Image: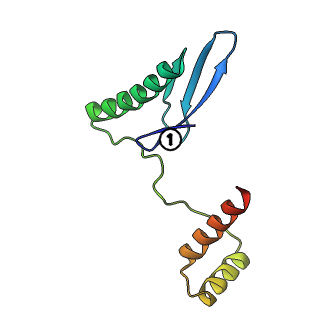
Amino acid sequence: MMEYKGYIGVVEYDHDAKIFHGDIINTKDVITFQGTSVDELDKAFKDSIDDYLDWCLSEGTQPEKPYSGKFNVRLSPELHREVALKAKKMKLSINNFVEKALMDEIAMVQ
């Protein structure tokens, strides 16, 4: 993976075309880049993001931010209750409890 200005790109190699092709994966907007060498790919990656940001500015629109730090989670009422009770026992907000649970899970997977 590649990262620039908060945008994350993933790259695949097309053996037939002998070219690297990448996509920005943390935005709904389509941003792609390609190159035949690592240096060319890196430059194209950064140029594509800069072009996207410049285009948004010229159009007077806000560029899509990669992640806002907010997401909605739907739970069953029973699980919601259990989460709220466990968070209360731990003297945490539900948000802090969920954040801790996710961080613990990610640490276990790595």
Relative horizontal placement of residue 13, taking residue 60 as reference (left or right): right
How many marks do you count on the picture?
1
Please name the colour scheme applied to the rendered image: rainbow
**Relative to residue 79, is residue 17 depicted above or below?**
above
Where does label 1 land, which residue? Answer: 27
Nearer to me, 19 or 80 = 19
**Label 1: how many Cα within 10 Å (few below 14, some 14–19, many 20+):** some
Q: Quadrant of the C terminus?
A: bottom right
Q: Quadrant of residue 63?
A: top left
Mark 1: which secondary structure?
loop
Write the residue at 66% across / 77% down.
80
Relative horizontal placement of residue 58, taking residue 40 as reference (left or right): left
**Relative to residue 55, is residue 74 depicted above or below?**
below
Q: Quadrant of residue 57?
A: top left
**Relative to residue 62, is residue 50 depicted above or below?**
above
Q: Quadrant of residue 81?
A: bottom right
Relative horizontal placement of residue 28, taking residue 47 as reference (left or right): right
Residue 6 rendering spot, x and y as whole percentages: 44, 44
Write the residue at 58% across / 37% down.
1
